[in-house]
Image (cartoon, grey):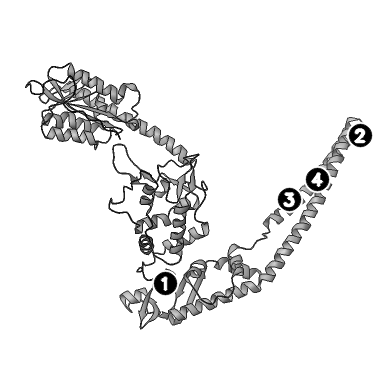
């Protein structure tokens, strides 16, 4: 934003000491956001018009010129407008001159307040040259007040209309998956060839991948922030500044230049990292300073618009963990591998970890907080639980591996059946082609009067019926081939790739387990992420 200020040393100004002259402020404003354009409202032309007007009046004397270049009329927190108000408060100004009412502002209630209340209360004459307004503090002309209100109303409509048109254009671009923001999400940059397309910033993308990896590895969001801060890694806002971008996060305190819990959480929940363009999350009303967060169903999300930084498998695991609300631990500690995966099988409350004499045990959360009146202890040690889960997982892996041969045989059989089916289809198509030729020859015989019309129709009907039957057979075979799956569910493939596990870790638990329910007497129910697929597979080979 440029600011040009003129003081009372201007050539041609009148003697300010004459009592009949009013110390005058010239106020000039220009904003492309309001649709101001053209030479007629340029800063230079506004200034020339106002200076000529003051010089033509014996009762006015120029004190200073106040220019806000690039500031919207819907907001009155403009630097030079506020400086002018400060000078009015200091009784340095007795008159304010503008080109027209829209230069003062485009917010009808606020403009009316200044003209009808503020200026008169400070005994300041207000002049709008093009509107023919010359309002003094003692004026009681209600017709002029009405005209001012009407003009203000239309001036207020204009930026709203412009805003509506601009928003409509933006929404159309957002609907096509084009990026319209000023700054890309951390991890991306706007393409040099197309600013509506995002490309990966490898350095920042590496930090994003690391954040997802640390969270999957068991670190809480506060812990991740502390680790990054301890390593001196710049947070997203600081990184943008280091890259030369004029970026400011309005939600961040000026003194905050480090990673925070909310920064980490926003990254972990940002769909931009899986290649989806997410826009229209906030809405800023005209004349309002702060944007409001829109409901999620109002967001504009277009899938697959740019290269993802995070794969879908990692994304799904992280979102599942975020929904579990695992407790944040201290920096020097790690999240326990079962954190967020243990529930009391009877009351449904999460189990809590307790360390007694160096031994980690899990108790029912209801019992631990409220006592026996609400639930029993359901006590199980970490060692016991890990042993049970490890043994069960290894049994599943062994069972699946024993079935590997059956699966391969099934694949080979399906492939053989498919090849046979394709051979049948090929033969059927030859039969269809032969019958089509017979039908054509019958028509030629009819055209050459070799056979009668009745004979032709009889032959034609017979061939068409045979063709219809054969095509039905081809369709049945095609449907059967399409219904046969030549690949096993991805979860089963993962189990087949696993060797017998010697120990459990957080990554394995997150990968394999959906929830573990602890009942009395160490009875345990383990719900795996692949339970349905495994049941279907085992059932099909009983």
* Image quadrant in which the N terminus is located: top left
Question: Which label number is shown at residue 467?
Answer: 4
Cβ atoms at labels 2 and 1 below 8 Å apart = no
Answer above or below: position of 149 versus 279.
above
Cα distance, mark 4 to mark 3? 12 Å
Q: Which residue is mark 2?
A: 451
Pointer 4: residues within 10 angstroms few (<14), some, or many (20+)?
A: many
Q: Which mark is in front, 4 or 1?
A: 1
Cα distance, mark 2 to mark 4? 22 Å
Q: Which mark is in front, 2 or 3?
A: 3
Q: Secondary structure at mark 1?
A: loop
Q: Which residue is mark 3?
A: 475
Q: Residue at x 77, y 56 (%)?
A: 421
Q: Secondary structure at mark 2?
A: loop
Q: Which mark is in front, 1 or 3?
A: 1
Residue 429 falls left or right of residue 534: right
Q: Position of residue 256 (x, y in %)?
A: 30, 54
Q: Secondary structure at mark 4?
A: helix
Pointer 1: residues within 10 angstroms few (<14), some, or many (20+)?
A: some
Q: Which residue is mark 1?
A: 336
Q: Position of residue 69 (x, y in %)?
A: 29, 31
Residue 12 falls left or right of residue 387: left
Pointer 2: residues within 10 angstroms few (<14), some, or many (20+)?
A: some
Q: Residue at x 50, y 50 (%)?
A: 275
């Amino acid at each position: 934003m440029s600011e040009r200020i003129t003081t009372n040393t201007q050539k041609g100004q009148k003697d300010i000491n004459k009592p009949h002259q009013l110390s005058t402020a010239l106020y000039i404003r220009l904003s492309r956001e309001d649709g101001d354009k053209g030479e007629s409202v340029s800063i230079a032309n506004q200034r020339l018009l106002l200076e000529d007007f003051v010089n033509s009046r014996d009762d006015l004397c120029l004190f200073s010129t106040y220019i806000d270049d690039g500031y919207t009329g819907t907001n009155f927190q403009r630097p030079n407008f506020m400086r002018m108000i400060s000078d009015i408060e200091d009784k340095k100004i007795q008159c304010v001159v503008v080109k027209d009412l829209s230069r003062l502002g485009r917010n009808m209630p606020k403009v009316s307040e200044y003209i009808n209340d503020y200026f008169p209360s400070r005994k300041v004459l207000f002049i709008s040259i093009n509107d023919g307004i010359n309002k003094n503090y003692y004026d009681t002309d209600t017709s002029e007040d009405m005209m001012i209100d009407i003009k203000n109303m239309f001036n207020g409509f204009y930026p709203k209309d412009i805003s509506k048109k601009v928003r409509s254009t933006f929404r159309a671009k957002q609907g096509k998956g084009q990026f319209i923001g000023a700054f890309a999400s951390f991890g991306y940059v706007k393409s040099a060839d197309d600013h509506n397309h995002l490309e990966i910033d490898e350095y920042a993308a590496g930090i994003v991948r690391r954040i997802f990896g640390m969270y999957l590895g068991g670190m809480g969001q506060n812990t991740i922030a502390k680790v990054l801060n301890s390593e001196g890694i710049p947070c997203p806002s600081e990184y943008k500044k280091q890259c030369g971008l004029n970026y400011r996060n309005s939600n961040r305190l000026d003194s905050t230049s480090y990673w925070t819990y909310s920064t980490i959480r926003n990254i972990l929940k940002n769909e931009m990292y899986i290649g989806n363009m997410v826009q229209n999350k906030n809405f800023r009303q005209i004349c309002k300073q702060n944007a409001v967060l829109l409901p999620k169903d109002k967001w504009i999300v277009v899938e697959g618009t740019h290269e993802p930084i995070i794969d879908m498998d990692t994304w799904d695991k992280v979102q599942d963990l975020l929904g579990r609300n695992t407790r944040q631990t201290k920096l020097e500690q790690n999240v326990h591998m079962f954190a967020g995966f243990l529930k009391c099988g009877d009351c449904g409350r999460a189990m809590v970890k307790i360390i007694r004499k160096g031994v980690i045990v899990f108790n029912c959360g209801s019992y631990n907080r409220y006592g026996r009146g609400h639930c029993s202890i359901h006590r199980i040690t970490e060692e016991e639980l890990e042993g049970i889960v490890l043994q069960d997982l290894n049994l599943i892996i062994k069972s699946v591996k024993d079935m590997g041969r059956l699966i391969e045989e099934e694949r080979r059989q399906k492939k053989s059946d498919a090849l046979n089916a394709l051979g049948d289809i090929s033969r059927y198509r030859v039969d269809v082609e032969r019958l089509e030729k017979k039908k054509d020859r019958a028509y030629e015989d009819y055209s050459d009067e070799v056979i009668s019309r009745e004979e032709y129709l009889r032959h034609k009907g017979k061939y068409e019926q045979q063709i219809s039957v054969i095509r039905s057979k081809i369709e049945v075979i095609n449907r059967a081939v399409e219904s046969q799956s030549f690949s096993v569910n991805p979860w089963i493939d993962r189990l087949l790739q696993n060797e017998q596990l010697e120990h459990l870790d957080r990554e394995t638990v997150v990968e394999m387990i959906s929830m573990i329910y602890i009942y009395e007497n160490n009875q345990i129910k383990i719900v795996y992420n692949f339970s349905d697929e495994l049941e279907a597979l085992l059932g099909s080979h009983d």
